């Protein structure tokens, strides 16, 4: 099974809230992109060709894998990563859509959303190789940064992409799953279903209402590596949703904690107090990308940018009071508006 998502790069803390499934619900699930997918839908009164829907979903997932899997050596993204510098590559329509979105988020996020961080992720031991659990040499970080930097390393001219460095590698872990979720959502809609939720590895798109006639109930996990619990349950309808957290994939050395969330400017793990960020947007792809970007930025700067972009975002910070650590939430105006509407 080829994998699109590096769960070492971004651990999605979204979980489905426990709820009673109505008799009219349709449930489909399976494996994809190194994780799992779930589709819950309220069947339309006119009936639904379930077998045909399953075939269409499988075909869509295979197509996304063939374009965007970093673990598929024949995929489109693997072909791009194998290119030499200054060699133009004509992207498919889907890759063009994804790369345009990635560039927009990159520029709007102080360039902290960066698809080219793969070599640094591997260097810090959070990639496909066996984790080292050790801080890399400063010289190695400096060397790894030479081929990193989305603005300098990648050039888009229409549907043509060109790399500036031979060693530049594009990893789609922080946006590709969201793209796949949106594709599945489009497939479900094409079968006349208007009330559904699609989830891949924690990235979600919702439409309409659940079988009880209510918005979909989705829980955000408490960002605590010691336990699994829900901190907050959201009511979500006709929106994409994604959460990025730093608390599952990390190591400690000499009493210092190093997470897998890397600052694109320094090439080192972030040091701020923000533990997770949840973002709601019009689709799962943008929610996926922005959740990553805002977590890298941290709550203080991330909140400023989220408000400027009119994003519905919820930041969860670690805070210490009287020697005890607890979690505090901070919501943007748009997030508060959606949840109180």
Image (tube, grey):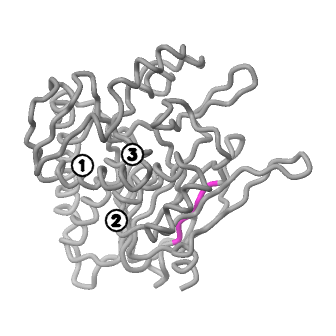
x%, y% of residue 333?
Answer: 56, 75
Dot 1 and dot 2 residues touching (CB under 8 Å) = no
Figure check: 33 above or below 180: above
The 10 Å Cα crowd at callout 1, few under 14, some 14 to 19, many 20 or more, is many
Dot 3 and dot 1 residues touching (CB under 8 Å) = no
Q: Considering the numbered disc 3 on the image, is that residue within a helix, a strand or a loop?
A: loop
Name the foreground residue: 99 vs 341: 99
Circle 1 is placed at which residue position? Answer: 99
Disc 3 versus disc 1: nearer the observer: 1
Circle 2 is placed at which residue position? Answer: 283
Residue projecting furthest to the right: 322
Q: Quadrant of the N terminus?
A: top left
First to last magenta residue range: 217-221
Label drawn at residue 174: 3
218 is within the stretch colored magenta: yes
Q: Say whether residue 141 is left or right of residue 43.
A: right
Mark 2–mark 3 Cα distance, whole angstroms, equals 14 Å
x%, y% of residue 283?
Answer: 34, 65
């Amino acid at each position: 099974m080829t994998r699109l998502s590096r769960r070492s790069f971004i651990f999605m803390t979204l979980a489905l809230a426990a709820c009673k499934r109505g008799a009219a619900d349709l449930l489909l699930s399976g494996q994809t992109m190194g994780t799992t997918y779930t589709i819950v839908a309220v069947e339309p009164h006119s009936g639904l060709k379930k077998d045909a829907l399953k075939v269409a979903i499988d075909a869509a997932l295979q197509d996304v894998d063939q374009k965007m899997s970093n673990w598929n050596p024949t995929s489109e993204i693997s072909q791009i990563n194998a290119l030499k510098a200054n060699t133009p590559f004509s992207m498919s329509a889907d890759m063009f859509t994804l790369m345009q979105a990635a560039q927009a988020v990159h520029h709007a996020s102080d360039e902290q959303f960066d698809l080219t961080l793969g070599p640094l992720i591997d260097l810090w031991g959070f990639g496909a190789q066996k984790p080292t659990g050790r801080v890399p040499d400063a010289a190695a970080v400096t060397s790894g940064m030479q081929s990193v930097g989305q603005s300098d390393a990648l050039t888009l001219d229409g549907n043509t992409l060109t790399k500036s460095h031979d060693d530049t590698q594009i990893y789609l872990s922080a946006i590709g799953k969201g793209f796949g979720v949106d594709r599945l959502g489009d497939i479900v809609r094409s079968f006349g279903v208007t009330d559904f939720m699609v989830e891949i590895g924690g990235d979600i798109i919702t439409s309409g209402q659940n079988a009880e006639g209510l918005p979909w109930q989705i829980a955000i996990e408490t960002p605590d590596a010691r336990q699994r619990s829900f901190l907050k349950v959201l009511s979500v309808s006709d929106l994409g949703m994604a959460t990025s957290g730093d608390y599952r994939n990390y190591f400690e050395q000499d009493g210092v904690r190093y997470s897998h969330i890397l600052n694109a400017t320094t090439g080192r793990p972030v040091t701020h107090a923000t533990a997770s960020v949840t973002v709601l947007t019009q689709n799962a792809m943008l929610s996926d990308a922005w959740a990553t970007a805002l977590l890298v930025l941290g709550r203080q700067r991330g909140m400023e940018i989220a408000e400027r972009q009119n994003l519905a975002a919820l930041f969860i910070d670690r805070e210490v009071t009287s020697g005890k650590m607890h979690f505090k939430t901070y919501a943007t105006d748009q997030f508060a508006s959606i949840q109180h509407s």
